[in-house]
């Protein structure tokens, strides 16, 4: 068992996972140094299908980062979800989150995890991490403090209290205590 908080997901495509890991490593590097690259460099790290999953505040933003692509065309074709996040809001949430990004890993059968270490509570939540995972076409299967996901989400470990999300209800536990080491 890891000592860190996690978001667990399935990433069957190793090539897509490598692209995801590249974005994760860039976010981790910038967070660790507390010097984030300019906003206009972030979209360059994502493929077009991932960018198309996000909302864009203006038609001009969408045209700049997804030239010639009508709204929702790519993500719909790739079977990816339309996320509730605006792209730069997700990046901003990573900037402002009160946690350290630790690692992301994938085993041979595609089971994957993103590890992070909150400095306190509230720390900003895992929503931006979930959005990052989903925009690459991966399916979140659970984790520590992942609200609003299906009841297949892993529950609290022995000795941990289960709290319920005001968003998710009784079937969606949130673990607020750090897992035992």
Image: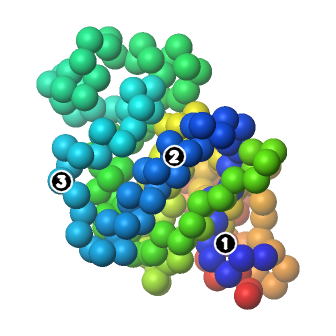
Q: State the mark number for residue 175.
A: 1
Whether pointer 3 and pointer 2 mark residues with C-beta atoms closer than 8 Å, the reply is: no
| Mark closest to the chain's N terminus, 3 or 1 | 3
* The C terminus lies in quadrant: bottom right
Q: Which residue is mark 2?
A: 20
Above or below, 74 against 28 in this view is: above
- Closest to the observer: 36 or 9? 36
| Mark closest to the chain's N terminus, 1 or 2 | 2
Whether pointer 3 and pointer 1 mark residues with C-beta atoms closer than 8 Å, the reply is: no
Q: State the mark number for residue 38.
A: 3
Above or below, 150 against 115 in this view is: above
Crowd class of label 1 (few under 14; some 14 to 19; many from 20; radius 10 Å): many
Q: State the mark number for residue 72.
A: none
**Does 168 sit left or right of 128 as displayed?**
right
Residue shown at 22% from the left, 58% from the top: 37
| Mark closest to the chain's N terminus, 3 or 2 | 2
Spatial distance from mark 1 to mark 2, Cα to Cα?
26 Å
- Looking at the picture, how far across and down is residue 124, in whole percent? 42, 67
How was this image coloured? Answer: rainbow
Residue shown at 14% from the left, 25% from the top: 60
- Closest to the observer: 100 or 141? 100
């Amino acid at each position: 068992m890891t000592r860190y908080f996690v978001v667990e997901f399935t990433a069957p495509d190793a090539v897509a996972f490598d692209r995801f890991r590249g974005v994760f490593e860039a976010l981790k590097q910038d967070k660790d140094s507390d010097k984030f690259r300019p906003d206009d460099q972030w979209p360059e790290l994502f493929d077009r299908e991932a960018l198309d999953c996000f909302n864009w505040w203006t038609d001009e933003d969408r045209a700049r980062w997804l030239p010639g692509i009508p709204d929702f065309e790519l993500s719909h074709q790739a079977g990816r979800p339309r996320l509730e996040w605006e792209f730069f809001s997700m990046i901003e949430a990573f900037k402002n989150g009160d946690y350290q990004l630790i690692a992301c890993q994938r085993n041979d059968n595609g089971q994957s995890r993103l590890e992070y270490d909150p400095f306190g509570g509230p720390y900003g939540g895992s929503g931006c991490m979930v959005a990052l995972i989903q925009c690459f076409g991966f399916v979140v299967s659970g984790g520590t403090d992942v609200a609003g996901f299906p009841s297949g989400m892993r529950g609290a470990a022995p000795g941990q209290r289960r709290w319920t999300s005001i968003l998710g209800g009784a079937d969606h536990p949130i673990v607020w205590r750090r897992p035992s080491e």
